Image (spheres, rainbow, N blue to C red):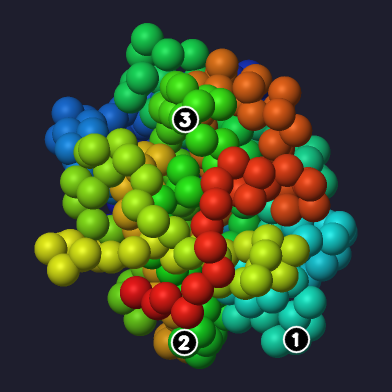
């Protein structure tokens, strides 16, 4: 079989020459070109898929650093390295979802990587009239055969400062597949259009307090229609701050590794930081500062 045709690529923003991009990639150097259909999906449904964001070479470069976090070669202190689905005192060997918050804070050389740069161009195309910036980043790894590696139904705004504190909630969150995702491995699933009202559903804390466990569960309605959003390695999903979404456990024999970056309105980030909110789980300021999510036996 003949090798795939390649086309010439532009220079990196740093001036270093990239290898030619494969023909058909929706890229112009460090810019990902968002289609009108992808924009409609994002604004109408709350989630869209961006295929072929990164080349295999670019994913592999990021993957090498990612794995150093997962092996704990790169140290991440306190609650910023945890299992998001379990109490904070869970032992590492018992983790089902390895969660690493703010990787570029703890390993600055990762800052400004090709994924971040491409994501910035997508955010600018979605919100051309709103200055956007990276708010936080996160690494997630659902270990193989972990059916309990579940992120329950939620809206991202349930975890973040409320609209009284941050009236402009404009957000696009990117989830890069380091491993191809599927229903078996726990791909993202969502309720299309559920965020259109821009209101927060009732959420319930899974622990007795945020000190016990960080995760929340949103109430679901009989009318909710659930759609799965699997993506291949190197592709991403993007979703807004209000869409109701979840991911199930990983019953496959392989890892399910994801790299999350959220871009928000620059003015919103400034208000978050002024309130002491940085997305670090080590912060004293968290969702319990801005919301009252009662502990409950409720499950979706």
Judged left or right of residue 148, residue 198 is left
Q: Nearer the viewer, residue 285 or 297?
A: 297
Does residue 68 appear anywhere in the picture?
no
Position of the C terminus, as image quadrant, is: bottom left
Q: Mark 1 points at which residue?
A: 93
Residue shown at 28%/59% (left/top)?
190
98 lies above or below 158: below
174 lies above or below 300: above
Image coordinates of residue 251 in percent, x first then y, are 43, 87
66 lies above or below 272: below
Q: Residues within 10 Å of mark 2 (few under 14, many from 20)?
A: some
- Helix, strand or loop at disc 2? loop
Image marks 1 and 2: residues in contact by CB distance under 8 Å:
no
Q: How crowded is mark 1: few (under 14 residues within 10 Å), some or many (20 or more)?
A: few
Image coordinates of residue 39 in percent, x first then y, are 23, 32
Q: Which of 20 and 112 is in front in this view?
A: 112
Residue shown at 65%/20% (left/top)?
270
Q: Nearer the viewer, residue 131 or 299?
A: 299
Residue 163 circle label = 3
Query: Reading the chain from its start, which is encountered first: label 1 or label 3?
Result: 1
Query: Reading the chain from its start, which is encountered first: label 1 or label 2?
Result: 1
Residue 147 circle label = 2
Q: Disc 2 versus disc 3: distance between alpha carbons?
A: 35 Å
């Amino acid at each position: 079989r003949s090798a795939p045709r390649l086309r010439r690529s532009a220079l990196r923003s740093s001036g270093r020459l990239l290898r030619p991009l494969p023909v058909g990639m929706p890229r112009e150097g460090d810019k990902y070109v968002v289609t009108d259909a992808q924009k409609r999906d994002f604004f109408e449904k709350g989630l869209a898929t961006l295929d072929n964001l990164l080349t295999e070479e670019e994913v592999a470069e990021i993957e090498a650093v990612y794995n150093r976090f997962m092996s704990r070669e790169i140290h991440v202190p306190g609650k910023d390295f945890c299992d998001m689905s379990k109490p904070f005192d869970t032992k590492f060997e018992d983790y089902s979802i390895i969660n690493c918050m703010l990787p570029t804070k703890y390993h600055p050389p990762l800052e400004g990587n090709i994924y971040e740069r491409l994501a910035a161009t997508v955010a600018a195309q979605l919100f051309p009239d709103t200055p956007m910036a990276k708010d936080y980043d996160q690494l997630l790894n659902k270990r193989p055969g972990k059916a309990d590696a579940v992120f329950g139904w939620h809206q991202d705004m349930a975890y973040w400062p409320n609209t009284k504190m941050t009236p402009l909630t404009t957000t696009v969150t990117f989830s890069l597949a380091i491993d191809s995702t599927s229903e078996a491995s726990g791909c993202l699933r969502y309720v299309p259009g559920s965020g259109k009202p821009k209101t927060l559903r009732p959420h319930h804390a899974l622990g007795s307090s945020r000190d016990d466990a960080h995760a929340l569960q949103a109430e679901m309605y009989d009318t909710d229609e659930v759609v799965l959003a699997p993506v291949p390695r190197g592709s991403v999903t993007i979703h807004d701050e209000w869409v109701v979404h979840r991911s199930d456990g990983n019953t496959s024999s392989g890892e399910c590794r994801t790299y999350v970056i959220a871009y928000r309105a620059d003015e919103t980030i400034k208000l978050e930081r002024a309130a002491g909110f940085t997305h670090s789980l080590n912060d004293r300021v968290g969702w319990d500062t801005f919301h009252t999510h009662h502990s409950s036996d409720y499950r979706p």
